Image (tube, grey):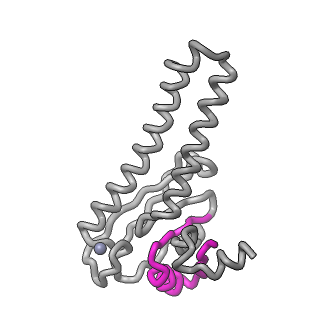
Amino acid sequence: MLSRATRDGEEGCRLSRIATVTLPRNRIPNFPDRCVTCGKSGPGSLTRLVAYDLFSGGLIPFTVRVPCCRPCGLRLHAWRLWSSVRALLIAGLAMWLGIAILLPRLPDVTTGLIVLGLISATFMGIAIWDRIFPPAFTVDPRRLTVDYEFRDPKQAAEFARVNGAVQVSPG
Ligand SMILES: [Zn+2]
């Protein structure tokens, strides 16, 4: 019953606000001549995105150039910068909490577990938050594939069509 409700949700379902198109990592994607953020056609400029998959791709960067008007490009980069800074801030704050507050009072192992638990819980919270309020466009590279994620399902469908791929809307 739950899965049916989720599938039928479309706009109403909070967790299906991202439309994903997966392509092989070594393939250069074709983009329709449309800003990936606001959807304006003929944006006249490209913006370069660099993304990492820290879990399976190590530190090998994935780079892609996407059509994007200038103001949208700035917003996109600002969001990505904030997203990285936020992760570092959380990790730093949890470490500080562990070293300055918990370690003098608790055994090492307990402190380590609490810090790890805090970091994992916060990152999970962020992942859920980003699903509910996703950026207009993002890339998520994996070892062999790359997920191109669009907030606008129509943009995703167009991107999928020009790349001969299938759009997947999770949910
Ligand atoms: Zn734009």
Image: 157 above or below 66: below
In reply to whether residue 39 is colored magenta, the answer given is no
Judging depth in this view, the residue of 81 and 165 nearest the camera is 81
Q: Residue at x 61, y 42 (%)?
A: 120
In this view, which residue lies farthest toward the top?
104
Residue 71 position within the rendered picture, expressed as x and y whole percent measured from the top left = 24, 66
Determine which quarter of the picture holds residue 105: top right
Residue 167 position within the rendered picture, expressed as x and y whole percent measured from the top left = 58, 80
Image: 15 above or below 129: below
Q: Is residue 36 left or right of residue 94?
A: left
Residue 65 position within the rendered picture, expressed as x and y whole percent measured from the top left = 38, 67
Q: Residue at x 30, y 61 (%)?
A: 75
Image: 121 above or below 159: above
Q: Which residues are magenta?
A: 145-171
Determine which quarter of the picture holds residue 88: top left
Number of labels in the image equals 0
Image quadrant of ligand 1 equals: bottom left
Q: Is residue 34 left or right of residue 16?
A: left
Q: Is residue 110 left or right of residue 121?
A: right
Q: Is residue 75 left or right of residue 1?
A: left
Q: Residue at x 54, y 77 (%)?
A: 12
In reply to whether residue 157 is colored magenta, the answer given is yes
Judging depth in this view, the residue of 95 and 1 nearest the camera is 1
Q: Is residue 20 visible?
A: no
Residue 161 position within the rendered picture, expressed as x and y whole percent measured from the top left = 52, 87
